[in-house]
Image (cartoon, grey):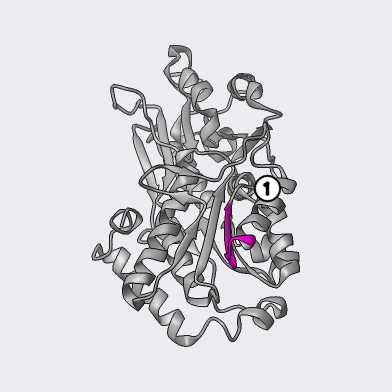
C-alpha cells in the first residue's frame, strides 16, 4: 500500500532498479544513485537493486515492489519491457513508477496515472560539445560511437553531428563526422553482449577513428568509453564525456576530456520522487533541457592542472563566447538541433 502523503518522508520508500553498471559506475547509474542518496539525506527511506544482465530487470523490479517501495524508478532504456509490465499490473496501481532515459511509448500513447517518464534532450548538450570539439580540432574531423543503438544513445550522436554542421555553416569550413549518420541511422556500435562495459572495444574504436583522421572522439558507451579516453590520452588527443562531468568522476582522464555532455539524472530522480511524495503519482513526462537545467556541458572554467595544460590555450575566450551564444540560441528556439542533425 502507498504511504499517505502526510505520513512523513520517513514512511515513504524511494527505490531504484539500477542497470548493470551499478551504483559506482562513474556514469549513468551512479548519477541516479547520487540522487537517491540525497533523498535519503532528506529523510526518505531508500532501496536499490543492480542488474546482472537483462534477465535481472523483472525480478529486481518485483523485489522492490515486494519490499514496499512507494516509488520505483528503473534506470536505463533496456528495462522498459519489465517496467511497463509492472506499471500496468493492477496490483501495483498504488505504486509510482519512473523510467530514466525514456518516456511511455506503448501504442495508445496515454501515459499511465502511476508512471513518470524521465528523458533528456541530450542532443542540445552534445551539439554544444561538438561545436567546441570542431573549434579545437586540428584535423577538422570529429568522431562518435555508441554502446548500442538505443534512442538515449543516438540522441547524443544526433547532437554531435548537429554541432559539427552548425560550426561548418558558421565558419564556412568543412567538418567531417565519423561514426554516425543521423539520416540513414547507421553508425558505429558495440555488437558485444556487454556493449557498455567493454574497454577493449573503446580502445580499438578510438584507434580506428584516429586512423581515419579524427582527433576528438565522443564515446556514448558507458564504461566502454574509458578505453577510448585512455587511448586518446596516450596519443595526446581529445575526448568528450557523457552523462556526468567525467573530468571529476574520472580525474585520470581529465587531460583528454574537453568537456562532457551531461544529463542531470540525479536531480531528475529527486524531482520525480518529491512529486510522487506530494501526491502526483505520475501521468506525465519530465524532459530535461538546457532551458530547465536538465542537460548541460561540463564547465569550461576549470582549474584542474591536467585540463588547463591541454585545453587552457585551445579553448579561447572567443570559442567560449560562441558556445554560449549557441546555447542561448537553442534555449530561445532560434536554433533547432534536429534541423542541423540532418543537414
The residue that label 1 is drawn on is 224
Q: Position of residue 84 (x, y in %)?
A: 46, 22
Q: Residue at x 47, y 34 (%)?
A: 98
Residue 216: in magenta span: yes
In this rendering, the answer to whether 103 lies above or below 291 is above
Q: Residue at x 49, y 27 (%)?
A: 80
Q: Residue at x 59, y 34 (%)?
A: 15
Residue 287 visible in the snapshot: yes
Q: Position of residue 92 (x, y in %)?
A: 48, 18
SS for tag 1? helix
Furthest residue in direction left, as rendered:
334
Foreground residue among 244 and 143 = 143
Count of marks placed on residues: 1
Furthest residue in direction front, as rendered:
212
In this rendering, the answer to whether 41 lies above or below 143 is above
Q: Position of residue 1 (x, y in %)?
A: 51, 20
Image quadrant where one finds the C terminus: bottom left
Q: Position of residue 217 (x, y in %)?
A: 58, 61
Quarter of the image holding residue 114? top left
In this rendering, the answer to whether 302 lies above or below 259 is below
* Few, some or many residues within 10 Å of mark 1 (<14, 14–19, 20+): many
In this rendering, the answer to whether 342 lies above or below 52 is below
Residue 274 visible in the snapshot: no
Q: Residue at x 43, y 48 (%)?
A: 155
Magenta residue span: 211-219
Residue 127: in magenta span: no
Amino acid at each position: 500500500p502507498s504511504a499517505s502523503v502526510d505520513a512523513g518522508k520517513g514512511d515513504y520508500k524511494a527505490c531504484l532498479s539500477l542497470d548493470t553498471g551499478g551504483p559506482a559506475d562513474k556514469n549513468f547509474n551512479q548519477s541516479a544513485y547520487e540522487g537517491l542518496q540525497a533523498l535519503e539525506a532528506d529523510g526518505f527511506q531508500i532501496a536499490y537493486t543492480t542488474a546482472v544482465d537483462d534477465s535481472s530487470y523483472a525480478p529486481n523490479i518485483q523485489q522492490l515492489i515486494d519490499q514496499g517501495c512507494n516509488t520505483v524508478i528503473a534506470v536505463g532504456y533496456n528495462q522498459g519491457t519489465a517496467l511497463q509490465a509492472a506499471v500496468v499490473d493492477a496490483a501495483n496501481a498504488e505504486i509510482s513508477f519512473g523510467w530514466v532515459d525514456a518516456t511511455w511509448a506503448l501504442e495508445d500513447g496515454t501515459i499511465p496515472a502511476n508512471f513518470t517518464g524521465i528523458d533528456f534532450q541530450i542532443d542540445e548538450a552534445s551539439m554544444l560539445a561538438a561545436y567546441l570539439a570542431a573549434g579545437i580540432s586540428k584535423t577538422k574531423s570529429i568522431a562518435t560511437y555508441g554502446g548500442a543503438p538505443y534512442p538515449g544513445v543516438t540522441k547524443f550522436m544526433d547532437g554531435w553531428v548537429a554541432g559539427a554542421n552548425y560550426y561548418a555553416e558558421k565558419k564556412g569550413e568543412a567538418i567531417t563526422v565519423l561514426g554516425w549518420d543521423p539520416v540513414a541511422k547507421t553508425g558505429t556500435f558495440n555488437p558485444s553482449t556487454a556493449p557498455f562495459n567493454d574497454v577493449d572495444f573503446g580502445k580499438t574504436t578510438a584507434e580506428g577513428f584516429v586512423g581515419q583522421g579524427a582527433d576528438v572522439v565522443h564515446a556514448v558507451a558507458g564504461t566502454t568509453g574509458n578505453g577510448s579516453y585512455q587511448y586518446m590520452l596516450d596519443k595526446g588527443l581529445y575526448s568528450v564525456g557523457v552523462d556526468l562531468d567525467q573530468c571529476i568522476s574520472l580525474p585520470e582522464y581529465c587531460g583528454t576530456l574537453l568537456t562532457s555532455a551531461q544529463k542531470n539524472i540525479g536531480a531528475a530522480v529527486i524531482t520525480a520522487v518529491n512529486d510522487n511524495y506530494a501526491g502526483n503519482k505520475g501521468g506525465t513526462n519530465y524532459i530535461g533541457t538546457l532551458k530547465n537545467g536538465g542537460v548541460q556541458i561540463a564547465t569550461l572554467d576549470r582549474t584542474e592542472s591536467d585540463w588547463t595544460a591541454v585545453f587552457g590555450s585551445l579553448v579561447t575566450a572567443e570559442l567560449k563566447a560562441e558556445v554560449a551564444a549557441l546555447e542561448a540560441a537553442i534555449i530561445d528556439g532560434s536554433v533547432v538541433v534536429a534541423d542541423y542533425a540532418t543537414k
